[in-house]
Image (tube, rainbow, N blue to C red):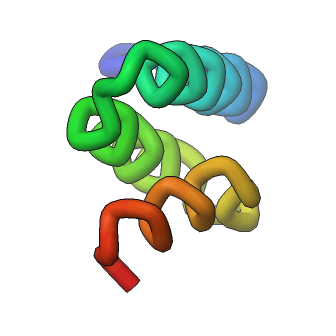
Amino acid sequence: MKIEDRPEWLLELAAAYAGRARELAAKGMPKEAIILWENRALVAPQLPPELDYCALLLRQGKV
């Protein structure tokens, strides 16, 4: 991705970040999950925030 920036690759990476963030949140690792959600937003800013991320922020008192 550093050499060739393809939108479909970025969307796949964003999906991978979301999946891993959900796994970490389920394991009781909210700080790590929030970091991955933030990385997802950096990779694909055109995507809206997912409800899982918003709920995690609310539970952590970050909103």
Q: As drawn, which residue projects farthest toward the left?
A: 31
- Residue pictured at 60% horizontal, 61% vertical: 55
Residue 48 visible? The answer is yes
Residue 54, relative to residue 20: is it above or below? Answer: below
Looking at the image, residue 56 lies above or below residue 2: below
| Residue 29 drawn at (x, y percent) | 30, 27
Residue 25's x, y, as percent? 46, 29
Residue 3: where, in percent of width, then height?
Answer: 36, 15
Q: Residue furthest bottom?
A: 63
**Residue at point 53%, 21% (across, down):** 26
Q: Is residue 16 left or right of residue 33?
A: right
Residue beneath the point at 32% across and 20% down: 2
Residue 37 higher or lower than 55, as above or below: above
Quarter of the figure with the C terminus: bottom left
Judged left or right of residue 62, residue 56 is right
Seen from the viewer's position, the closer of residues 51 and 14 is 51
Q: State the count of labels.
A: 0
Q: Point out residue 31 in the picture as x, y percentages from the top left corner.
A: 23, 41
Nearer the observer, 6 or 14: 14
In the rendered image, which quarter contains the N terminus?
top left
Can residue 6 be seen in this snapshot?
no
